[in-house]
Each structure stands twice: as structure tokens, then as C-alpha cells.
Image (cartoon, coloured by chain):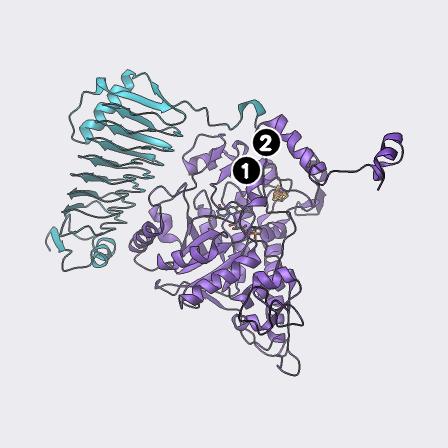
Chain colours: A cyan, B purple
Amino acid sequence: MSDSREFDLAATSVRELNQYLHAELPGSDVTRISVQNPNGQHSIGAGLDCPVEVDIHGHAGYFIAGMNKQARVTVHGNVGWSVGENMMSGQVRVNGHASESAGASAHGGLLVIDGDASSRCGISLKGGNVVVAGDVGHFSAFMAQAGTMVVCGNAGANLGDSLYEAVIYVGGSIDSLGADAREEPMEASDVEALRDLLTEAGLEGDAENFRRVGSARSLYHWNAEAHQEY
Amino acid sequence: MNGPSEQVSLPLAGGPEQLEASASFDADVMAYIRRATQCGLYDIRGMGAKRRLPTFDDLVFLTASASRYPLEGYREQCTSRTVLGGRFATKPIELDIPVTIAGMSFGSLSASAKDALGRAASEMGTSTTTGDGGMTPEERQSSKTLVYQCLPSRYGFNPDDLRQADAIEIVIGQGAKPGGGGMLLGQKVSSRVAGMRTLPEGIDQRSACRHPDWTGPDDLAIKIGELREITDWEKPIYVKMGATRVFDDVKLAVKAGADVVVIDGMQGGTAATQQVFIEHTGIPTLAALPQAVEALEEMDMAGEVGLIISGGIRTGADVAKALALGADAVSIGQAALIALGCNNRCHHDGEGWVDVSDDYQQLGTAPGFCHHCQTGRCPVGITTQDERLEQRLLPEKAADWVRNYLQVVNMEVTTLARACGKSDVHHLEREDLAALTVEAAAMARIPLAGTSWIPGCSTSNTDPGS
Ligand SMILES: Cc1cc2nc3c(=O)[nH]c(=O)nc-3n(C[C@H](O)[C@H](O)[C@H](O)COP(=O)(O)O)c2cc1C
Ligand code: SF4
């Protein structure tokens, strides 16, 4: 039995590929999957749950590697909305650009975007890490609860709106901060954590020159004066 | 009515009955304004709309007589078996009764309340639903058929629970607050609840009202595709919506690929929502259901796509009428809570009844009037995370109550179905109903009793203008 397999999505359906990834792959000797001709199709590699390397050669659609666990997925191209959404563990890497909501609600794992990410990148983040080498669009890290988002380029308007405990590091400019988001001093521990993340993501960057954005936590209680008597 | 001069001459004479209250600014409105001045935050409460609305009570059955013959009550079979989700899913949901338990989160409900509902539902052969807080191992264990909600917040949402669910319900909205997100006040965000939701303990939690990873109906179709891929097309996918523009919304959900559409009318309960939402948004369940049915029929999808209706369903009669109007099943929230002992003056400690009126009083209410689920201080242990209060609900005992209640409801449904000459509760039809009020006739599109008049309906053989 070989340790790698190739799927040509011009000839095989996404359904057949995913069925294989869910049912046959775990427990087999296959450790590498190569996917050709994704042609913008959606949900490729959604629901992976084993330590495998998946390479998708070309542009892919929405929800690539959605809810990923354990697998390391690389897209050699651009992706549509919500790549790596609700990821639990493992790593998803996009060599190109990502459309909206990249890494939405990710609970764990690492999402790396080598290009730019569009709006709402890292929305609702729940413990995962998102590293974007380029820029991110508006409302990124909206309501992000836990985890870290790194933007090496510039961030669009309303960054970190209604942020909870997630932390954002930005290397470039910030168009504006969202409600309850505030810039905070970079401590030594931030520099260290950021350096580790950049290394893990295989990216260069001068961690000392990043800015930290966190939550002012003023929305944690709706009406502080009322002592929760509502 | 006194003239102006008399009023001037008798400023303080007579009892209150001679004082004229304002219809616009009555005592309730004044209390509302005063409360706002003191609190600076809108009123948040639990349960459903309290105002009077046209309901299933405004319909009656035209049971059999000379023109139709009935089935024998105890001798002839009448099945209530209900299958949901066969459109695309390879493993549809099969239930023994057409009454399901609606999604109520662990967090809003105590673990013992969830446990009791799961046990009762399993005994009766029906399903329960998770909620805005993820799936607990306890509820997976106690509930034989468990529907897993995919909500905008995605609290605790994960692929393992997705795969161990029996169906998936994508929540776009709910009847108590269509267009609004979930709320859980800090009092209920205990360490376990906070951990499951990845939030700091004790914060006032307001969850998102839009999904993080998709926006419009075209995206919804792709999202449904992703969930199907992850679960290998096995599990039925429900789409739940609050009842507003029901006709259009149902069509969009069907086009997006839903196996089952859940419509929650404006009476639908909640654990905590702004009062302004509860009383002033959405349309009554009675009006929503025919719109949903019409949408399915127009798309030739009735029977293919399942339809669950909820919002103020209480009795076997309600369920039977909902089925007759075209629903495949109903879902209940508040009624299930009341079966657990909600608004009861006493809780049962295993040996006897213990009066807890004082606890209601401390909440500023009384048994029978309580809607204080948002406080987390439920006197009967249902909507609380307080360890002491939670112990007031004994899961096994409460499960018996809920099971008995569901049994009564189902018996009433089959009783009515038999009397209409039906050997299957799903054979109940619109033709079996008459409306008691003009409003109900117009909303339900059922002829006003004693006439063939359906207001606003051009197909009626009576001229609506006459
Ligand atoms: C205590 C409580 C908690 C609820 N939690 C949720 C929830 O987490 N998700 C959801 O979609 N609906 C939730 N609902 C709404 C119910 O699922 C359902 O739509 C509603 O209760 C039906 O109306 P009824 O209560 O009149 O039967 C909740 C309702 C109640 C009473
Ligand atoms: S008794 Fe408990 S469940 Fe019922 S309305 Fe009051 S707080 Fe809510």
C-alpha cells in the first residue's frame, strides 16, 4: 500500500474524496493526499479527523478544511469564504488569498494565510490561532473569544469589535478599532508568544514592532451601574 | 361621563372608579417608563409573549358524523409515528409521537432539567434538542434522539458532537426574538457554562445574531453542503427560523437544501430576551403555519421537506390542529418546562411537596406569574445554574411528569384523529377544521364556522364582500 494518494477533482467528486478521507483514510498507511483540479469547489477536506498532509493544488471554494482536526492542509491557491472554520486542531495554510470569515469560530489549531484575508477574518475565534502574512479586511476578530490573531500587514476598520479574551497583534496600520477594542502595551511575554507563532507559521517578522489589541472589557456587563439588577 | 365643570367642583370626591385612567398611559405603561428611568437598560425576561393573540384555540374540529365515520377509540389503531428528514439524509429521524422537545441550552436550563427532558423524550420515543451552549455528555446519554443546534454563537460547537448527533438544526432565529441573538446573564454563566462557551465566568453574555461563516441564503446552501459533507450525508438538516416573512423564508430554506424547516411563532418561549422583542416581533404561530405550508406546496415539497411548528403549543388539541393545518410535527419549550414544574408553588424533594412561594416572592413574582428565567434563580430548579436550586428538580421524578404529559398530549391527538376518521394522525387535514373568529379564519385560511367564508381568500365560494 502506498503512503500517498492523488485525487483529481475533475474526475472524482468532492463527496467521494471526503468519504474516503472520513471512512478509509484513518487507520490506513496513507499519510499524504494530493488533490488536483479543485476548480473552486466547496467543502474540500471538510471534517478531516486524522494526522494527514493534504495538498490542494489550485483555487478552492468555501469551507475548505472546515472543522478540521489533526490534519495539515495546504491550499496552493486562493480560497473562498470560511477556510478552516471551526477548526479544532491541526493546521490549515493558504498560499494565496482568503475571502471572508477565514478561521471563523476556530477552537484550536493554526490557520496561516500567506496572502491577504478579506473581512471578518478570525470572527468568533474560540481558541485557535490565525496568522495572516498580508492585510485583513474590516470587522476582523469580531467577537473573538479566545486565541490569537496575527496580522503582519494592515487591518481594516473596526478591528476586534466586541472582543472578549482573544488577543490581536498587528504589524502594520489599523484603520480603526471596533467597540470595546483597545491598544495595549506589548509586554515581553507578548513578544515571545508572537515570535513563537510567527515561527510556527514559518513567517518572518519583527515581533517587537507589532502592536497589541485586546478587550477593554467594558461590555462584559451591560449596565455596570445597575449591578446586574436587570 | 362628568362634564368639565363637575370635575372642577369635585376634585377629590368619589372612589377611584370616578377617576379616568388613560388608555394610552395606563398603569402598565407608567410602570414601564418608571422602570426604564431607574434601570437604564431594557427589560429582559424569560418565557413567551403574554399578550392575547389568535391561537389554535380559535379553531375547532369537524369530527365525524353522518357524512364521515369515526374510528373506535380504544379498538382501532391510530398511528402517530413521525418521520422527519428523508429528503436528502440517509438516516432520517423516526419518532413515535409528533411532539418534539425544542432546543433549550444547557446554561439556560440546569443539567437536571436537561436530563429529565432527555429521559422523558426517550421513553416516549421522541427527540430533544441541544441549544446555545453546546451538547453535554449527560444529554447525549439520556436522549435517544438528539438534535444538535448550529447557532450563530457556535459555543461549544465541534465535529465530534456533530457526528454523534442524530440531526442538525441550523438556527437562523427563534420566535421570541427573530433577528436577535441569545442572552445569558452573568448570574447563569457558571464555571461549567463559561467553560463550555469559552467565555469568562460571570459575564453578561450576548451572543451573535448572524452566523460567523455565512450570510445570505446562497451561502446557507453552501453551509448546509459542508455540514452534509462532514456528516457524510447521513443526518437530517433542519433550518429553524422565527416567524416573520414565513412564505419567503421557507422557500429560501428549502432552496438551500433543508430536510426539515422549523418555524417558531411569536409566542415561542425563551430563557432571556428583551421584552420588546418578545411582545412586538414576529407573527402568531396560527398565521405562520399556513404560510409555511403554502410555500412548501407551491414548491411541490410538502411531504418531501418536513415541517415542524412551534410557539405556544400546549395541548393535544393544539398539536392535532397543527397537524391538520399541514405540520409534520410540533416542538415544545414552555409547555415542557411547565411539565417539569415551572410556575409550580412547590417543588418535590423526593418525599413530599415543599412550598417555595417565598422564593417566587423574592424574585418579585408569584407562582403562576413567573417569567424570571433570566435571573438564574428559578424557585423550582429548572432554569438555574445554582447548585442548591438545581437540586430542587429530581430528574427521575420530573422525567415521569414530562412523560405523562407527553402521553396525554399524544392520546388527545389520536383521540381527535380517530374521531375525524383517521387511522394516522398525519391524515388530519384542513378540511377537518372550522374557525371560531374572523381573525383565525383569515390567518389559518380555514372557513369561519357555519360558513364557507375564508376572509381574503378569493377561492372561497362565498363572496367575501357580501
Ligand atoms: C428556557 C428556554 C431556552 C431556550 N433556548 C433556546 C436555544 O438555545 N436555542 C433555540 O433555538 N431556541 C431556544 N429556545 C426556544 C425554543 O427552542 C422554542 O423555539 C420555543 O420554546 C417554542 O415555543 P414554546 O416555548 O411556546 O413551546 C428556548 C426556549 C426556552 C423556554
Ligand atoms: S419557575 Fe423557573 S422556569 Fe418557570 S418561569 Fe420561573 S424561573 Fe422560569
Mark identifier at residue A230? 2
Residue denoted by label 1: B385
Residue B437 position, x and y percent, is 66, 62
Q: Secondary structure at mark 2?
A: loop
B465 versus B104 height, above or below: below
B122 versus A181 height, above or below: below
Q: Amino acid at mark 2?
A: Tyr
Q: Amino acid at mark 1?
A: Gln
B235 versus B344 height, above or below: below
Residue A194 position, x and y percent, is 24, 24
Q: Secondary structure at mark 1?
A: loop
Name the quadrant of the C terminus of chain B.
Answer: bottom right
Q: Chain of mark 1?
A: B
Query: Toward the viewer: B251 or A125?
Result: B251
Residue B443 position, x and y percent, is 57, 60
Does any portion of residue B209 appear in the rendered image?
yes
Q: Chain of mark 2?
A: A
